[in-house]
Image (cartoon, rainbow, N blue to C red):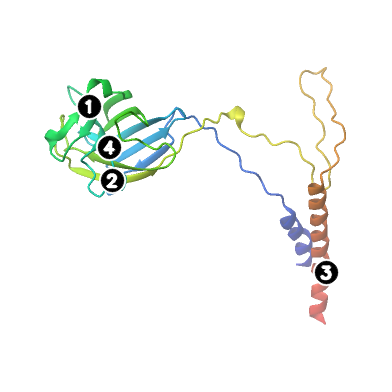
Amino acid sequence: MRLFTALILPGLLCHPNTASTAQAVDCSEYQHTYEMPFSGGAVIMDYVVTADGMLKAKLTRQGKGWVGMAVPSDPNCQICMSGSDAIIGVPGENASVLKYDLNAYKLADVIPMEDTRQTLMDTSIAEVDGTTVVTFTKLLVEEGENPIDGNGPNTFLYAMGPEGGTELAYHTLKGKYQLDLSPCRDISETEMPVPSPTADTDGNMPAPTASGGEDTKPTVAPPTQPSGDSTSAAFECKFVSGLVVVMATLVPAFLVL
């Protein structure tokens, strides 16, 4: 037992921490997935906020029918539909993904915005494995529309229509949700941090290595004086190790007495 303590415990106490590494990020891809509240997974949103002020999103609903989201005029609203700006995808022969003004709570008051305000990009709508999938890219801030904060909290609405519908009809599921958005930053594998050689606990630097062909001679770096931090860490580690060995040897002797 004393041998185990003397040999193993110092290594545990002096074991260096391992640094975490960043993962590559491609901001042209969706970075987040959100399941709409109280939908039971019937409506899901994948999204990313780009550095140039865009919301790129994909809405997926179970079954066939229209699905959409909206930005209310008041983020603290309790009754939110009236005055909201909506994006709705409608499947069918005349399938469309358009922006709408929600002027009131009647279907007749859900009006497509005029052509000059139909600024959505990368729009599509498709039926995939029993779901309806709508994609679009939208400017966060547009004149005359409710803004989206790309670097802060937002309130949104969602809704979906009846199963099998190929035109707008009264929604069968709706809700309000909050998302705290932030712009995505591309991180390529070449940008990921690479650890630099560091001295070990004894202050020794790694041996130089050669690169290139067989005739390439290794480049030997000039001797590097270990920093105060590494020297201090080595001293502390040796001190702790020595102390543990002494304690592991003496404590049992005192117990016998």
Q: Quadrant of residue 36?
A: top left
Up the image or down, 147 lies above or below 202; here it is: above
Q: Are marks 1 and 3 in contact (CB under 8 Å)?
A: no
Q: Check disc 1 and report its element: helix, strand or loop.
A: loop
Q: Is residue 78 above or below residue 214?
A: below
Label 2: few (<14), some (14–19) or many (≥20) C-alpha neighbours in 10 Å: many
What is the distance, in whole Å, between disc 4 and disc 1 at their CAs? Answer: 13 Å
Which amino acid does the dot numbered 3 rest on?
Thr
Residue matched to label 3: 249
Query: Looking at the figure, which quarter contains the C terminus?
Result: bottom right
In this view of the protein, which residue sits in the foreground, 131 or 134?
134
Residue shown at the point (25%, 50%) measured from the top left: 78
**Residue 151 in view (yes/no):** yes
Which of the labelled discs sits on residue 113, or is there none? 1
Q: CA distance from mark 3 to mark 2?
A: 67 Å
Q: Residue furthest front?
A: 144
Q: Is tag 3's residue or tag 2's residue first in the polypeptide sequence?
A: 2
Q: Are marks 4 and 2 in contact (CB under 8 Å)?
A: no
Quarter of the image for the N terminus: give it: bottom right
> If you read the primary sequence from the N terminus, does the residue marked by circle 1 or circle 3 appear first?
1
Badge number at residue 176:
2
Which element carries disc 4, helix, strand or loop? strand
> Do tag 4 and tag 1 residues touch (Cβ < 8 Å)?
no
Which amino acid does the dot numbered 1 rest on? Met
Q: Which residue occupies 42% across, 40% down?
A: 181
Numbered disc in front, either 1 or 3: 1
For the residues carrying marks 4 and 3, which lies nearer the camera in this image? 4
- Which disc, if any, is residue 70? 4
